[in-house]
Image: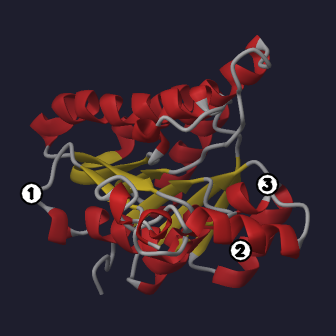
Amino acid sequence: MRLKNKVALITGGNSGIGLATARLFLAEGARVAITGRNAETLDAAAKELGSGLLTFQADVKDVEATERAIAHAAERLGPLDIVFANAGVGGSTPLGKTGLAAFEEVLRVNLTAVFFTVQAAVPHLRDGASVVLNGSVHSVLGAPGYAAYAASKAGVRSMARVLASELSPRGIRVNVVSPGAAHTPIWSAQASSPEAYAALEKRISRGIPLGRMGDAEEVAKTVLFLASDDASNIQAAEFFVDGGTTGSPMGAPIYLR
């Protein structure tokens, strides 16, 4: 088991990539605590994953609630070996049609809350721990209509380098996993029916070199690698899990067929 006897905390661990990562971490021997805003999905996660999982209802925008959740997790499970700052929101913010509140909400959840999650965890981290931040391909794609989301994720990748510099003296690694389009609630929320989702998936897949959307489990496996001792000499790196979207965009089916 790659995470035997390690303690992990995952924000937004009640759905999507966070839930898939919690499931994988438990299978690899970790003791896991997750946070989330929604009590119903937290209960569902606890029911699915069993007694090895601790759940805390906390909105990452609420710094004090996040601090309490992390402190309680460390009190119950012991010092933290892994933090996956995963919680985030999508949201279209097109130029000329976006209010200040909508723009700032995305930044507050996806960027500001990530900083304060790590800050809250630092006193509870073991030396040599691993911190993984959830980024996105949108940090580099320039997709129309997603200025706030792209800015927040570009901020995450830049902030990771700063956090790595500050935490390196303790041997704490800080890295970023940046998913492309994957089967998660953020994408399914954009379709009003199964038929609409199938059409969306088909359209998106034409722009991905591997010709398909990814799965949350594929991202979770990358987080597992970064969290494990297998990545013991990887620091301030960003791993794109995107089927080649950022690395070889001209290989996508839309250009080749």
Going by the picture, which residue comes out furthest to the front? 257
Name the N-terminal-most of marks 3 and 2: 2
SS state under label 1 = loop
Q: Amino acid at mark 2?
A: Ala
SS state under label 2 = helix
Q: Is residue 88 above or below residue 83?
A: above
Q: Position of residue 158 (x, y in %)?
A: 31, 29
Q: CA gap, disc 3 to disc 2?
A: 27 Å
The residue sitting at 14% across, 38% down in the picture is 168
Disc on res. 203: none
Q: Amino acid at mark 1?
A: Asn
The residue sitting at 50% across, 27% down in the picture is 151
Mark closer to the observer (1, 2)? 1
Q: Position of residue 253 (x, y in %)?
A: 46, 70
**How many residues crowd mark 1 within 10 Å: few (<14), some (14–19), many (20+)?**
few
Closer to the camera in the image, 197 or 115: 197
Q: Are marks 3 and 1 in contact (CB under 8 Å)?
A: no
Closer to the camera in the image, 21 or 76: 21
Mark closer to the observer (3, 1)? 3
SS state under label 3 = loop
The residue sitting at 71% across, 73% down in the picture is 45
Mark closer to the observer (3, 2)? 3
Residue 50 seen in render: no
Disc on res. 190: 3
Disc 2 marks which residue?
Answer: 46
